[in-house]
Image (cartoon, helix red, strand yellow):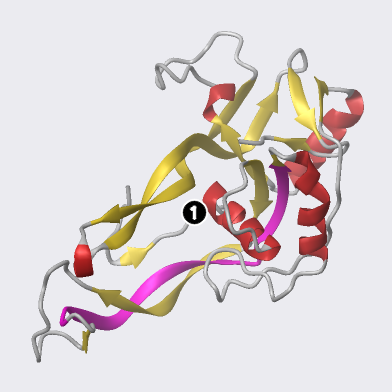
């Protein structure tokens, strides 16, 4: 739920749906490819930026003096300036795990040699891809080397989206599980992951709306304390949290 209707707010890291959308765009997929995503990263600062906002009320006809634009169906649109949050110097570590593992090489190639400039989020949010690797994901307990890397990443200020299931009981979000695999201090988000286009209306008024079918509850945190007796997923270097 937004805390402001005057300022368009942003997530501290891109939600899963945004990352999945970038993958599908770069690979030119024409149908949805199920995949898990792990998102880690940081940003230097947050500022406000101006953008042009288009507002309309369903069914409201164009009125001269009230609306600035009219649609081909005669509906009115208000146009004006607004503010949006903008993250500065964002650095991300993304792990893409397609359900169909034969797509790994295709996805890696699309990131190494994109057919157009990659963007993550808005069209103007250009992404500079620094490194692309195909890695093996393994589950095991923490080793001394893992703890060293984990401490180094914490020192760098890297945050991550942790699945809430690692920390608390899904059936009772207010109940902490005794013996849970992690402890944390952070912010809980319910992030979008997958949507479907649903047809609304009929005839000339028919149109499609986006309906979310998969939402993931996560904790955004950089204060993550792992339990050395529990098993976690690693890519050989980083601990990851795919959803």
Q: Which quadrant of the figure contains the C terminus?
A: top right
* Residue 83 visible to the viewer: yes
Image spot of residue 119 (x, y percent): 62, 69
Q: Which residue is drawn at 29% across and 63% down?
A: 207
Secondary structure of residue under mark 1? loop
Q: What is the quadrant of residue 66 in the picture?
A: bottom left
Q: Is residue 34 left or right of residue 189?
A: right
Q: In this view, does 102 lie to the left or right of 29?
A: right
Image spot of residue 173 (x, y percent): 41, 22
- Above or below residue 229? Residue 35 is below
In the orientation shown, which residue stands out farthest toward the front?
Answer: 203
Residue 199 colored magenta?
Answer: no
Q: Which residue is drawn at 41% across and 16% down?
A: 171
Image spot of residue 18 (x, y percent): 55, 56
- Above or below residue 129? Residue 159 is above
Q: In this view, does 127 lie to the left or right of 140?
A: left
Q: What stretch is highlighted in magenta?
A: 74-97
Which secondary structure dominates the residues rendered in magenta?
Answer: strand
Residue where numbered disc 1 is placed: 11
Q: Residue at x 55, y 8 (%)?
A: 178
């Amino acid at each position: 739920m937004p805390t402001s209707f005057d300022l368009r707010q942003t997530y501290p890291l891109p939600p899963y749906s945004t990352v999945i959308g970038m993958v599908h765009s770069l690979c030119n997929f024409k149908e949805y490819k199920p995949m898990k995503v792990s998102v880690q990263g940081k940003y230097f600062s947050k500022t406000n930026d101006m953008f042009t906002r288009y507002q309309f009320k369903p069914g409201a006809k164009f009125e001269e003096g009230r609306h600035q634009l009219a649609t081909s169906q005669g509906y009115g649109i208000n146009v004006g300036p607004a503010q949006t949050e903008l993250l500065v110097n964002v650095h991300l570590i993304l792990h893409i795990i397609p359900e169909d593992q034969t797509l790994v090489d295709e996805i890696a190639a699309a990131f190494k040699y994109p057919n157009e400039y990659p963007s993550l989020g808005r069209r103007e949010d250009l992404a500079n891809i620094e490194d692309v690797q195909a890695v093996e994901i393994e589950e095991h307990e923490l080793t001394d080397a893992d703890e060293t890397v984990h401490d180094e990443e914490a020192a760098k200020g890297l945050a991550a989206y942790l699945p809430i299931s690692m920390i608390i009981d899904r059936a009772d979000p207010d109940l902490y599980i005794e013996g849970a695999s992690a402890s944390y201090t952070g912010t809980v988000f319910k992030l979008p992951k997958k949507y479907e286009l649903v047809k609304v209306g009929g005839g000339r008024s028919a149109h499609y709306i986006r309906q979310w079918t998969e939402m993931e509850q996560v904790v955004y945190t950089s204060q993550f304390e792992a339990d050395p007796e529990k098993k976690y997923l690693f890519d050989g270097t980083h601990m990851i949290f795919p959803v």
